[in-house]
Image: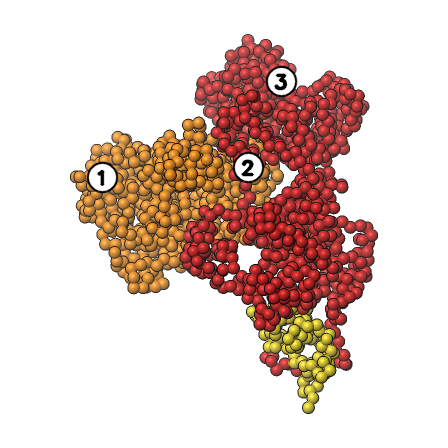
Chain colours: A red, B yellow, C orange
Amino acid sequence: MSTKERLVVVGNGMAGARLVEEIIARGGRDRFDIVMFGDEPYGNYNRILLSNVLAGAHDAKDIFLNPLEWYADNGVTLHAGARVHGIDRRARVVHAADDTILEGYDHLVVATGSNAFVPPLERAYVDEGVFRDGVFVFRSLDDTDAIIKYAENAKTAAVLGGGLLGLEAARGLVQRGLDVHVVHLMKHLMEVQLDRMAGLILRRSLEGMGLHIHLEKATCGVIGDPSVEGLLFADGTTLDCDMLVISAGIRPSTQLAIDAGLDVERGIVVGDDMRTSDENIYAVGECAQHRGRTYGLVAPLWDQVKVLADRLTSKKPNAVYEGSQVSTKLKVAGVDLAVMGSRDGDGDDEEVTYSEPSRGVYKKLIVRDGKLAGAILLGDASAAPDLLQAFDRGRALPENRSELLFALSQDGGVGGASLADMPDDAQICNCNGVTKGRVVAAVRGGCRTLKVLCDTTRAGTGCGACKKDVQTLLELTAGDAVAEDPSIHYYVPGVPLTKPDLVRAIRERGLHSVSSVFGALAGGVEDATSKPGLASLLKTIWGKEYDDERDARFINDRVHANIQKDGTFSVIPRIYGGVTSPAQLRRIADVAEKHHAKMVKITGGQRIDLLGIPKDRLPQVWRDLGMPSGHAYAKSFRTCKTCVGTEFCRYGVGDSTRLGIEIEQRFQGLESPHKMKLATAGCPRNCSEATTKDVGAVAIEGGRWEIYVGGAAGASVRKGDILCVVDSHEEVLKYMGRFMQLYREQAKYLERTYGFVVRVGIEKLKRVLVDDEEGICARLDADVQAAVDAYVDPWREADWPATPTQFSNALDPTDGAPLIPLRRASGAR
Amino acid sequence: MSERAINLGPLARIPEGEGRTFDVGAQKIAVFRTRRGAVYATQAECPHKSGPLADGLVGERAVTCPLHGYKFDLVSGDGLGHACGMLRTFPVDIDERGDVRLLLEE
Amino acid sequence: MTLPRALEPPGVATHCPYCALQCGMRVARTEGTDELDVRGDDSFPVNAGALCVKGWRAAATLAHPERITQPLVRDEHGTLAPASWDDALDLIARRVRETQERYGRDAVGVFGSGALTNEKGYLLGKLARVGLGTANIDYNGRFCMSSAATASNLAFGLDRGLPFPVEDIARTEAVLLVGANVAETMPPMMRYLDAMRAAGGALVVVDPRRTTTASSATLHLRLTPGSDAALANGILHVLVRDSMIDEAYVDARTEGFAKVKALVAGYWPERVERITGVPQAQIIEAARILGRARKSMVMTARGAEQQSQGVNNTLAFVNIALALGQVGRSDAGFGTITGQGNGQGGREHGQKADQLPGYRKIDDPEARRHVASVWGVDPEDLPRAGRSAFELLSTLGDDDGVRALFVMGSNVVVSAPNAIAIEERLARLDFLVVSDFFLSETAALADVVLPSAQWAEEDGTMTNLEGRVIRRRRAIDPPAGVRTDLEVICALASRLGRGHLFPSSEPETVFDELRRATAGGLADYSGITYARIDAERGVFWPCPGEGHPGTPRLFAERFATSNGRARFHAIPHRAPAEEPDTEYPLYLTTGRVLAQYQSGTQTRRVPELAAIAPDATAQLHPATARRLGIAHGDAVTVTTRRGSAQLKANVSPNIREDTVFVPFHWGGAQSANRLTNTALDPMSKMPEFKVCAARIDGGER
């Protein structure tokens, strides 16, 4: 017979099991024989994660905090699946499983948690406590499994209750592909945590994501027999649905305590020592009522069990629980939400609010004595981590409250930090600890060459990895004054001028052709590798007046197709926005067959590629296609990839397909230092990967578009920077055009936008392109317009070749077969 | 005494600053015409990966292969800035009619 | 001062005197001058010629005007006056005898260092055990590597900083770097991370500050100081949730995962965000980066380790590497980045209170027998485990504590936590001997100061963070009047009548004895010879025989645990010993800056380095500064329950609003360790350097 005291815990949930853990952690096993009762036939699992399980995001087997072995390992007797139905306080015995189990106690802890609240609904039950087929509550692992199984054959679900739990359930069902209706009795969603404004905005956002919200709807009955087919409302209206999940809140489960004659109000009444009206019986968790409050969140439960564990084990015999501050954070169908503390301030409180309904963003702080008393963050919870900690720790808040509303200090992604934007104390050379400031100072101090700069600052003299950055800083600071090894600054190797100088010279001397540039600026010496760079630049500068010499073009641009390793070409017709038609597809298929395309492939840019076409067949292929060139071969605007947008997608908030087509029709073939791949996404899910394109547009709530620039997903991967957020397709076209023109003018030849954006710095770009700091926006707009106007579909050359032999594979000598052998040239060795 | 040669037809068939491939019986020859009026002939395929040199970019005395950018001297056939073989080059001239002539063994 | 012996170019191949990377150097005298020319050694794989600013300037401490070149003994006026070696050593021997007769053998203590060569650390340990016969020896590595060491032993059964060569880092696909600022503390290591990034890999840095390293990362998790384990559990939670666990590996090579899995089920992102302050999106992103990489590495350093939960924090991150099945795989695994030059070797050869050479436990009879036989003494005569570093220092001067202390190569007044208390403790000693090459803050308090030779003036071996045993070579003779620590130890031993046990002060001879002593131990050096090190550019331990190739990569087949399996440990989040409150509203964390090293005894004396980082600063966030009315450059006072430090405000957005950072290279009123908390990790005895509660006052220009 053990001399230990007997500790019996009724309830094996978030509170009960946690309590036993805490007691064991405090060495309680030496003092107690611990016996536990749990309604459910398992160990203890993390109830918080049930909505993840419902959403299919978390495997049920992975949410167990205390698997059955745990109890055995820790010498805890667990009666799993045994319902306690009575407490004999005089005999200090707990009766369970129809009196088949009796356990005596010295200390009893009631942690029975809570039950789902089910409002009176006609025909919801088919029998005492037995729901009609298709009606569920969402409270336990079994409930969740049942809902998941039933949902497999359901299309439409109604969730009764627009509170926290209801929306969690709704989110789960949406993730499972159901059409979900949330029916709520109150004026706005989550009225317990949210004020009216937040509730309204949340509703809009959720509707934007395909949920149906019905407010101020009193549900009075269930329609359908034997299984649910719909809901009947007090106002006589009805709603069709294949299943009903009742999530209208929870009620402390107190029956056991009431029967035992303990003081019970809303919950089992406990004092600061967690003791009930019986000095040997304690209550913790959702079933307990402390200082008039009951809690439904996990944090307070764990605060309570810590106190009780401290007392029972005499670690801190006088520990007291003084109530908890509640906060919660959840994601409903992609909407971030964090709420903490009071919902509304009382008279003297300072209320700070920020509201941007179009984006579904609403933020509200309640400040009391310089500390955070409550907050609502909706649509953008990025500031939540700082705020939650300020709230939990009662930290003093900065005077400038706006710092709290926006997460200034929590940007984790640092990859794209540009040299131009770096603070002066940023370290450039790690080996020698040289800061950007010192390098810049040295350049200003007269170091105009990389070598002198490195020698002076010692930057780059260690492992040398930072030389590139030092070079860039030199350029940024000294501009054209950079001296040493000038050739690295030449726009093209064959003409000894930096891009700015070259542009100036070309403009001043009115050089309209590549050969004239060589003639005037390179002593007439034509450098093969310099030709395309110059051609691209001249085209950018002169637009229509550019004197186009074909030999300056790379072969691809001479025959408007992409040369392959075997000397054949690939043909990619323009398919605006990747939207095609059966007829078009049929035609492409016919052409592919007729010309024996060696391969037909869908490209990464959502286009169709016919590979293995000999040069001399190109014109006929184009004629047969009767479609414009897709420019898949050129250093120019390539394609604008799109997603399904609003027309069909459940989530789309912007018509990305139409916008993509508009973009492509406007900018097709626009020459640039390197290729430009674009994309438009209809919602932040970004299915078309617009954030990693050279230029991309992503639709956000309220018909607005985020414009990303400098993204990349090739050899190097980079998330684009947001240039600006605009609210119309016209605006998108305007700012994209502006950016592309600046890139055309200022980027080095073969410098992709991601290199360009990092080099110049997104902040600078914003100032130039959005704030028009340099007053050039109008000019940029005009120039890009001119370039657009100058566009001609190059495939028209099928019928108007630039030269007679433009598409010849090989020419024949005019007279007969040659006399072998040929003699080798004198020059040859 | 006149050399024996093959007439490759009017120079005009080769646009200024470009090249063209010619089928000369069994073999292919690339002929280039620079903007300064010089004409050169070499083997048609790049020794690197048999790229069509006639489709390359032509500069002063040099051609760049369109596939991987290897550069060759059009007179000597030497590789420029790389070590992947050299080109066979052939003597060519322009006759009085303005035709390109590929000169043959005596 | 002139350097006695000229060198023939290209100079002598040796290694940097500073951090554990131990970059290869070539040291030569510039023709016709006394200037020493130091350059990176291209042929040493670790740094391949690169050095950092400290390395470039390493020679500056050699011919330095403040160098001590003769013994100093405190005279009747209480001032340190020059004395002869004989007088100094005789005095030490006499006081040691007196102290031990009066208070017992253990009243004499020895305090070593992770900067000492293997030979010195080994012989110092031997001096304590068989020369002085005291149990009380420990070293400053307790303040550095002990948490990582304990954790590695628990998880893998073996403690070697990195179980792989640094080159492997370049070939992995994702690195989780926890509490390490390598860009500033060991810059040449960045090349490997950069190469990894260049090859498409991702770097995730965990640090309360946006350090140079953090700002070069793919993702920076700016956690709340002291919340490391919660963050690790949160990342593991997501890995489990998203089925990114290598079940096969976990089943085949580990034990204890079930408990960990159940534990982390309670660390869902929202909760972890609340504890750590790291946005849940970033926690998930970090997990994805690691989970999707085929090869990944997790590396911790002092940020996570120098806490009262240091061992647990480290184990929590070990769990991630194990769950991903990375440990023992090529170009992957778990490592911890050693700090001091010989922090690795320094903890293997008997400087620790509970250890004997070869990483043997002093309470293991077999170990005692083996070492005693090598030393030629009776196992029974070997002392038992003594007090760990901080416990030793905090009982100085007590009747049952150490009353005479011998400090070698350590500046405890600056480097130990709660420095003020330590200073008081040192004052209560009957007798303090310090061996150093400058009059460090600690030496200034000594009764006897012994001038010792420096890196370029001595031979010996070091073991770098990879477990690579390398050779430090004598490039020049020490200044006249200066002796090597080995010579001092032997001289002292003979004066104590134990000379026969210390026959030689020749490094190679001592090393050969070390090899025998470590034979059969965990850190087995028996197969390593000076000749092999020269021929192979370093040899990785364990190397149990001269025929054995050494072990660059550990755990490929089995772990060093009893059953060969790595062990998971379920680590619940526990708050740090001290958290901010209304009185001390900020977190204080400490660390290093690029141009300074450890207690600054060397680097503060190098003008070029002092110029880069002249004063001790307190880094705080602009919002915090504004609230307190502090401007950049203001003189501020940082105060904790232990004391105050006078610092210069460094206002920077690169730190959390709730945190202040103070580098620990300075002494006196600028000493960060006047502030730090002495709460110890129960397992490693590591003090909580990295987090405590603080207050900032001031704001005078």
Q: Amino acid at mark 2?
A: Ala
Do the residues indicated by labels 2 and 3 lie within the same chain of the protein? Answer: yes
Q: Residue furthest top?
A: A90
Q: Nearer the viewer, mark 1 or mark 3?
A: 3
From the top left corner, tell me how far across and down residue A148 is, in percent: 70, 31
Q: Residue A286: x, y in percent?
A: 59, 21
Give the letter of the chain under mark 2: A
Do the CB atoms of the residues marked 2 and 3 lie less than 8 Å apart? no
Circle 1 residues within 10 Å: few <14, some 14–19, many ≥20: many
**Quadrant of res A687:** top right
- Judge the density around disc 2: few (<14), some (14-19), many (≥20) Cα neighbours within 10 Å: some
Residue at the limit of the structure toward the bottom, as seen here: B1
The residues tagged by marks 2 and 3 sit, at their Cα atoms, a distance apart of 40 Å
- Pointer 2: what residue? A407
Q: Is residue C572 above or below residue A433?
A: above
| A132 sits left or right of A382 in the view | right
| Residue A717 spot, x, y in % from top left | 60, 50
Assess whether mark 1 and mark 2 are in contact (beta carbons under 8 angstroms).
no
Q: Which residue bears the numbered disc 3?
A: A253
Between residue A180 and residue C482, name the one nearer to us. Answer: A180
* Residue C509 visible in image: no
Give A378 or A282, whichever is nearer the viewer: A378
Q: Amino acid at mark 3?
A: Ser
Residue at the spot of label 1: C96
Query: Which residue shows up at 40% across the image and 55% down it?
Result: C24
- Left or right, A739 with respect to C209, comes to right
Hey, which quadrant is residue A48 in on the image?
top right
Please give the name of the residue rendered at 63% of the width and 34% of the height, measured from the top-left corner.
Answer: A356
Q: Residues within 10 Å of mark 3 (few under 14, many from 20)?
A: many
| Nearest-to-viewer mark from 2 and 1 | 2
* Quarter in which the C terminus of chain A is drawn: bottom right
Q: Quadrant of residue B104?
A: bottom right
